[in-house]
Image (tube, helix red, strand yellow):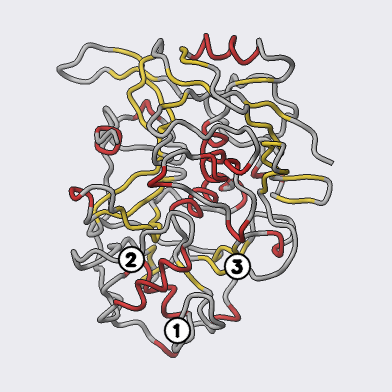
């Protein structure tokens, strides 16, 4: 595992607001009953979502809550990459006071007490896992996320150095410290549990039927966000279809349905990668940043320690016959790296951009403009 990929994004400094982390003092008589709480869906039909998202960020004293993940250093069993419900239940079992796990406490307060497992009736609000939070970010175009960093429920336990860390995502922020780097485009990273971030909790969706996104079949590595029956809302997806190339540095949305190549196409610079993909035939191209994230979230990861699985026992990309998962410890080229000048004091000026790190599904900065990375091509396909 490349520790450096977790530690540094060159030229970037994240700044969080400070606030009181206590959850005490809330007027219980003014709390909304769980059944009345407004939720939103990233799909046209809420029953076709893996989970429903609370319509607003959590607040304290009328302000967005910027709080700790935990107020203790003890490790927990909330380590699932894919199952935020089980993570939140694990935290409920070891919480010894109302503010032991502030980020998850909002969900715990909405769940009925007495459930002996995360699958029992009454325990249905939870802090999303790392991959679930990644889906929320990917479809952020219809989920009104703010500029704040958001906590996931996934504790990071890969290294002893990171045992006091949990996973975050920053979907919409302009990064302080480097004005030219514009948006972070869903920067996912592990940070100290006692560092403040905001919270958006979700609710499990037990309605039977097709859920989006899904992998088409065991013989077709096609990720479908929208098909003839509906699916992910149009505003969360790319408008152009099929997309033959990606020229915009700002638009990293996903296509409504795209095929993922069975294996890597080589190691190349962005210019070379575009040529490599185009040589495969019509519509083959370098994926956008969010498309790489979606490939990872839909079970395309090859890292045995961080094997993501699709919710509701859905089909994973790695279940497709002949599909080669993403390299366990590889960095992948994206079509919109948002290259910018990085003229930092004490360093020679150079152009850098984002790349996708496949081991943990993170975004890494500092990729030189002519730098080479692993290439996995995609192409838009119509799904009826």
Q: Nearer the viewer, residue 190 or 260?
A: 260
Left or right, 31 with reference to 246: left
Q: Position of residue 234 (x, y in %)?
A: 72, 44
Left or right, 161 with reference to 316: left
- Write down the quadrant of residue 237 in the picture: top right
Residue appearing at x 37%, y 25% in the figure: 180
Left or right, 23 with reference to 317: left
- Looking at the rendered image, the quarter that the C terminus falls into is top right
| Residue labelled with disc 2 | 77
The disc at residue 39 is 3
Q: Earlier in the sequence, mark 1 or mark 2?
A: 2
- Looking at the rendered image, the quarter that the N terminus falls into is top left
Q: Position of residue 259 (x, y in %)?
A: 68, 32
Which is closer to the viewer, label 3 or label 2?
2
Which is closer to the viewer, label 1 or label 3?
1
The disc at residue 13 is none
Name above or below for residue 113 compared with residue 22: below
- Write down the quadrant of residue 199 in the picture: bottom left
Asked if the residue under mark 2 is in contact with the one under mark 1, i.e. CB atoms within 8 Å, the reply is: no
Mark 1: give few (<14), some (14-19) or many (20+) Cα within 10 Å.
Answer: few
Q: Position of residue 33 (x, y in %)?
A: 54, 84
- Write down the quadrant of residue 318 in the picture: top right
Asked if the residue under mark 2 is in contact with the one under mark 3, i.e. CB atoms within 8 Å, the reply is: no
| Residue labelled with disc 1 | 116
Q: CA distance from mark 1 to mark 2?
A: 16 Å
Q: CA distance from mark 1 to mark 3?
A: 25 Å
User: Mark 1 falls on what kind of element?
Assistant: loop
Q: CA distance from mark 3 to mark 2?
A: 28 Å
Residue appearing at x 47%, y 83% in the figure: 31
């Amino acid at each position: 595992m490349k520790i450096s990929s977790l530690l540094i994004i060159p030229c970037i400094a994240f700044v969080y607001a400070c606030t009181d982390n206590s959850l005490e003092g809330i007027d219980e008589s003014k709390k909304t009953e769980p059944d009345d709480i407004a939720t939103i869906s990233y799909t046209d039909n809420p029953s076709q979502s893996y989970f429903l998202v609370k319509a607003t960020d959590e607040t304290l004293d009328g302000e967005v809550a910027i709080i700790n993940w935990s107020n203790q250093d003890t490790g927990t069993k909330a380590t699932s990459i894919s199952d935020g419900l089980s993570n939140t239940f694990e935290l409920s079992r070891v919480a010894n006071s109302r503010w032991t796990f502030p980020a998850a406490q909002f969900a715990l307060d909405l769940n009925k007490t007495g459930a002996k497992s995360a699958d029992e009736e009454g325990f249905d609000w939870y802090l999303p896992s790392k991959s679930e939070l990644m889906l929320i970010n990917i479809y952020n175009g219809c989920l009104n996320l703010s500029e704040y960093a958001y906590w996931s429920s996934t504790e990071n336990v890969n290294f002893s150095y990171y045992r006091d860390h949990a996973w975050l995502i920053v979907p919409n922020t302009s990064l302080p410290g480097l004005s030219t780097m514009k948006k972070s485009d869903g920067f996912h990273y592990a940070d100290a549990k006692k560092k403040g971030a905001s919270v958006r909790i979700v609710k499990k969706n037990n309605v039977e039927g097709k859920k989006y996104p899904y992998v088409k079949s065991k013989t077709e590595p096609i990720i479908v966000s929208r098909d003839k029956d509906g699916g992910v809302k149009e505003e969360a997806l790319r408008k152009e279809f099929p997309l033959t190339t990606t020229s915009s540095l700002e638009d990293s949305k996903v296509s409504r349905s795209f095929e993922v190549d069975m294996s890597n196409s080589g190691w190349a610079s962005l210019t070379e990668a575009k040529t490599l993909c185009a040589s495969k035939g019509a519509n083959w191209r370098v994926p956008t940043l969010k498309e790489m994230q979606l490939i990872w979230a839909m079970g395309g990861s090859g890292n045995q320690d961080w094997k993501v699985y699709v919710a509701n026992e859905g089909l994973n990309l790695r279940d497709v016959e002949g599909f080669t998962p993403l390299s366990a410890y590889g960095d992948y080229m994206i079509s919109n790296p948002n290259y910018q000048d990085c003229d930092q004091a004490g360093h020679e000026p150079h152009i850098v951009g984002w790349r996708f790190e496949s081991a943990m599904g993170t975004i890494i900065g500092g990729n030189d403009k002519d730098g080479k990375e692993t290439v996995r091509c995609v192409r838009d396909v119509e799904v009826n």
